[in-house]
Image (tube, rainbow, N blue to C red):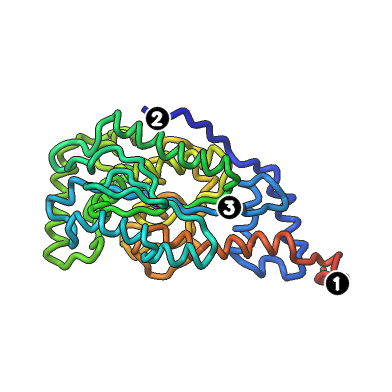
Amino acid sequence: MIPPFEIGPVRRERSSRLQALIDAKTKPLGALGLLESLALKIGLILRTDSPSLRAPHILVFAGDHGIATEGVSAYPQEVTQQMVLNFLQGGAAINVFARQHGIGLKIVDAGVKGVLPPSEGLVAARIADGTSSSLRKPAMTTEQCGRALARGAQLVSDLHGNGCNVIGFGEMGIGNTSAAALIMSRLCRIPLEICVGRGAGLDEDGLRKKRAILKQASQRVPPDQTPLSVLEQFGGFEIAMMCGAMLKAAECAMVVLVDGFIATAAVLVADALFQNFRDYLVFTHLSAEPGHYRMLEHLDASPLLHLDMRLGEGTGCALAYPLLQSAVRFLNEMATFDSANVSTRTR
């Protein structure tokens, strides 16, 4: 069951006024390139001509996948738990980048296999001890999927209530590129072999095995499933929880920062469920995972960065955040031709 989200479109009537403000700055028209369209988008999402980014946060959802036990990953399943402990100790890439840019960071146990000790930085939101293997049965039940969506939404609601208006999402879960590829193939209607990549570093033999296993998992499920059924059949608890969190952020008119391949799989589900959802998204980078390009093409999305990254964790969100700050600052602080007494171009 989908929680009751109400996601309206951004108010396009503000576009002309915002564009006029951008064009009036002391620069040639369009000289700041994509930074100008980014400023326009932020103003539309936040419903103001002078936007301010407040209390930025990144939520990293962690969960284990039953499909990992079938041999689709270069790493053993226990790495999920080990990496969560690394997050909590502040030693992962996302910790470094979040600290660098002053971004709040929360690690969410959506369904990590094994016991995680209580920690100040850990949000206990476990649905189950990892999902089932989608090779053999649905990854999660309808009830579990509904709970994951609702829990993700609640986490964002709490942050929004405390003043946050810009939020990014990351993930950790051995086997989650397999889940994302299966979701992508169904919702983008792209042959599965095009969607499957090397994940955390499979060699050629490992990649062939991964493709064969995922083909069997896909063949288990009849075509023409609903988006929610696709999520239940193939997704992970971290992907479902991220989907609910993203939808709530859009409902709250927050700027939603989208990371790489796994996060965009959650976007595909949310976008298929709510037609206005896409208005609130800023795609932060193009992942080196080969299927990500096709996902972005399906969503008609232009990412801000292309750094050949494929780490996940929300790292693209953290690295792109300064660009949002620059977009907002030039819109609010840069002089206009009139205020600076600078002549406009000759017509």
- How far across and how far down the image is residue 140, in percent? 24, 36
Q: Is residue 98 left or right of residue 339?
A: left
Q: Which three-letter amino acid code belongs to the residue tagged 2? A: Ile
Q: Secondary structure at mark 1?
A: loop
Q: Which residue is mark 2?
A: 2
- Crowd class of label 3 (few under 14; some 14 to 19; many from 20; radius 10 Å): some
- Where is residue 139 drawn, in percent x and y? 22, 39
Mark 3 belongs to which amino acid? Ala
Q: Tag on residue 329?
A: none
- Image quadrant where residue 124 sits: top left
Q: CA distance from mark 3 to mark 2?
A: 28 Å
Under circle 2, the secondary element is: loop
Quick one: label 2, few (<14), some, or many (20+) residues within 10 Å? few
Comes first in the chain, label 1 or label 3: 3
Query: In terms of secondary structure, where does tag 3 sit?
Result: loop
Q: Is residue 37 above or below residue 270?
A: below
| Residue 264 rendering spot, x and y as whole percentages | 39, 51
Distance (Cα) linking label 1 and label 2: 55 Å
Q: Do we see residue 206 in this rendering?
A: yes
Query: Mark 2 or mark 1, which is nearer the start of the sequence?
Result: 2
* Location of residue 182 with respect to 344 vertically, above or below: above
| Relative image position of residue 137 (x, y in whole percent) | 16, 36
Tag 1 residue: 343
Q: Residue at x 15, y 38 (%)?
A: 220
Label 1 vs label 3: CA separation? Answer: 38 Å
| Tag 3 residue | 55
